[in-house]
Each structure stands twice: as structure tokens, then as C-alpha cells.
Amino acid sequence: MKGYLVPHPPLIVPGIGKGNEIPDTRRAYEQIAGEIENLNPETLVIISPHSILYGDYFHISPGSGAEGDFGAFGARNIQFSVSYDEEFTSLISDLAGKAGLPAGPLGERQPALDHGVTVPLYFFKTRRIVRISLSGLPVIDHYRLGMCIREAGARLGRNFVIIASGDMSHKLPDSHYGFAAEGPEFDNLTRSRIEHGDMRELVEIDPALCEKAAECGYKSIVMLAGAFDGCKVAAKVLSYEGPFGVGYLTAAFEEISRIESLLPTLLADRDEKIRAIRSSEGEYVRLARASVEHFTLSGKRLKRPDGLSAELSNNRAGVFVSIKKDGNLRGCIGTTMPTEGNIAEEIISNGISAASRDPRFDPIESGEFGSLTYSVDVLSPSEPIKGKDELDVNRYGVIVRCGKRSGLLLPELEGVDTVEEQISIALKKAGINQNEPYTLERFKVIRHK
């Protein structure tokens, strides 16, 4: 089996750009196109980060086919019409379901093909495809879905090539998204691990680094890696360049021989990280975890334990409880002002809410306990400020208010690097337009992990 990592800059298409803005990437695309032509696959499996994205579901090839064009990039005359490999799609969905992965063609029935699909198709010719979206599910689940892709192809005897579409960091020098040191760091690390064929290290890149690098291709790479699970892989970087502040990496992957599955090692590594975190938990976090687990198992509120510190038992404050699963947010609820008799009761109450009442997520289930980590933020009383110059994303949280509407954002959040971003997100949470008159407040937090 062969697979490829390709970027998807529309400017590489001659009808959109001049055709020479990204020369190394274009040459790599042409090389890959020649290899695919020689392989003559029945189906291309294309993983795209720009198709329909669900937080808890992998969306796969709805219907019998789809169409698309480059109208969004000024070239509506370049059009695509593809047939979906419905048998392949159906079997991937079935295997995913048996593995406990929510995946399939449900949702919007026939969305237009996005540029994560059409840019590769421009070079690889229109043929039968399976189009797979990423999701908000953990990285390890993307790896496991890649395993389902391979198994489905093997059961059907399908000759297929897998294409992981995705760009690297969008925060390289001269990027209009702004520069972040993590951008080049992520790109160099990803490139190095591909060059060395180190699939384990590739799959275990720190999610916080991915977030700060503002990449869009990492989970595509992980799903491709999952399709090669149990294989010794020859991996080769074909090109890398970043002319517009965005990293464009192309690479080829080929199975050499069969070896043991990497999945048990990846799961063991994840469990060991969780154990290390658990061993260093303080009483604030232990109480939050106990509250969540007790409520999830019994449906009842945890009784405040004996022997807690005086700070937890006697003081009052607003508290936020945040829950993550494999590095991804799984729930976060809090109070800006105290609503309970003490901080301990505040943690117990907000732990229950974060686990079961965050509207962005389904309630936590007991089977997830082993992969969850927690943090508890204790808030100081807020104070009004005159403007954004009095904010610091690493020191202060922000509250925006307009009439009865208000929105809050905690400090030191991954991916929130500027005060402007902090205020903008808080305004969106509150449903306040940036042109409306609003006031600002700031507060400090003590974060317990």
C-alpha cells in the first residue's frame, strides 16, 4: 500500500495562481501524480481537514458522488465531479462502529467538495474516491479510523491509495496570521519524524504544539499513519517550503513489510502519561475528578469529603472546572462569583456541570475516566478596566458585558496569544457584536492541575 501527504494551496493551480509561486511543491505533486498513474488504483481515499467537521463524528462520503469547483478562488470554470466508492464507505463506517468510533455518511447529504479534496484531484485526475473528514475526537481515534480504512480495503480486495491532505503551520515568518515560534518548531519536528519513518513519535507530537502552530494537517497525517499500522514504512519527504507564512510539506509512504501493531504501544504511552498526571494532582483537582466520577456512576452529588484544607473548606470564590480528553477539551463550566458555601462545594458543583451540562459535548461516560485530565481555576473578584491596554492574556482573564449579556475567557489558554483574540472570543461567547458598546473587566486566577 502507498500513501501520500500533500498540501492544498489553491495558488498551485495554474488557473488560480501563475503556477510558479510554490515550485517545489508543484514538482512533488507532479511526481506523485505519475506514481499514482502507474499504480492505477481503483479508489483514492482522501482525508481533508476542510470538509464538514463534527466534534464527535467522522463524516464520510455521503451519497453516490459530489461536485465542486474553485469558485471561491476566482476560477469557477475549473470544476470537478466525482463518484463515491459507496461499498468502501459503508464498510469503513461499519468497522468504525464496531471499534466504537462514530463515523459514517450522516449529516449534510452532499456538500460541495472542498479545496482539501479538489487541489489533489486537480493533479491526480477525477476518479472514484472516498472522502473522509477529520473530527474533534482525540488523535488516537484518528489513528484507529486509519486502521479501519486499511481493514476495509483489505476485506474488499480494493486497490487504493490514501491521500492525507493538509498544510503545516500557518504561523511561519511573514504569515498574515501572525508569527509563532511554535510554527517552525512543529514543521521541523513533523518533517524530521517523517524522514526517519518514526510513526510512534509522529503520532505522539504534543497537542499543545499543534495548537500553537495553527496547523491543519496533523490529524490527516495521523489517520494516514493508522492506515499503515502493523507495517514497517519507508517514508520520504519530497518537498517542503513556506513562501506565504504557511508550511507546505509533501511526503510519500510505502509499506515494506508487516510488523506488530503499534496501537497497544500508543495506548500504553497515553495511559502512562495519564498516570504521571494523576500522581501529581493536588487536592483541588482530586476533588474535581472525584465529583465527576461519583456523579457519572451514581447520578448523585458527591458529599464533601472530610479532611480538606482550610482554604477549600472556609474560603469562597468563583471556580471553573475544565476537563480534557487526550489533550482535547471535553467540558468546561464555571462561576465568576461564588454560588456555594465554600470553594470545595463550588468545585463539586461545577465538576458535575462540566461533565454533564456543557452544551458543546455529550455527558461524560464512565468508559472515558481513564483518558480524562482536569484543571481547576479559582478566580479572584473581577475589576472594571478602561481598555485592552490593561489586559494580558497570560496574566488576566477577561469579562465582556453589554446589557444582560456577558462572556468570560480564562487566561493562559492554548491558541489564544493576543488580547484582541481574547476579547473577540469572549464577545462571541456572549453574543455581543464588536460594534456594540461593551465594558471590560479583568480577573486573575490560580490554576490547579
Image: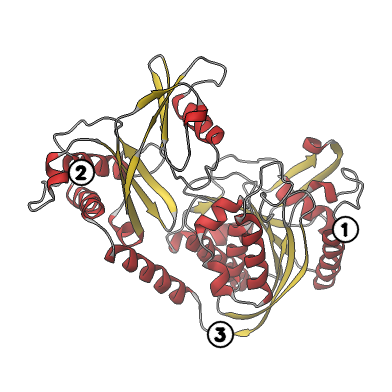
- Foreground pick, 232 / 288: 288
Between 422 and 323, the one nearer to me in the picture = 422
Secondary structure of residue under mark 2: helix
Numbered mark located on residue 348 in the image: 2
Q: Residue at x 23, y 43 (%)?
A: 347
Residue type pointed to by label 3: Ile
Marks 3 and 1, Cα distance to the nearest angstrom? 37 Å
Q: For this view, does 431 lie left or right of residue 189? A: left
Query: From the viewer's perspective, is residue 83 above or below residue 198?
Result: above
Disc on the earlier residue, 3 or 1: 1
- The disc label shown at residue 1, or none: none
Q: Earlier in the sequence, mark 1 or mark 2?
A: 1
Disc 2: CA contacts within 10 A as few (<14), some (14-19) or many (>=20): many
Residue on which the image places disc 1: 23
388 vs 5, left or right, is left
Which of the 4 quarters of the picture holds residue 197? bottom right
Location of mark 3 (residue): 259
Q: Are marks 1 and 2 in contact (CB under 8 Å)?
A: no
| Residue 120 pos. (x, y %) | 77, 55
Is 156 situated above or below 130?
Answer: below
Q: Where residue 38 sits: x, y (%)?
A: 84, 72
**Mark 3 or mark 1, whichever is nearer to me:** 1
The amino acid sitting under disc 2 is Ile
Category of crowding for the residue at label 1, using alpha-carbon neighbours closer than 10 angstroms: few (below 14), some (14–19), many (at least 20): few
Of callouts 2 and 3, the N-terminal one: 3
The residue shown at (77%, 36%) is: 72
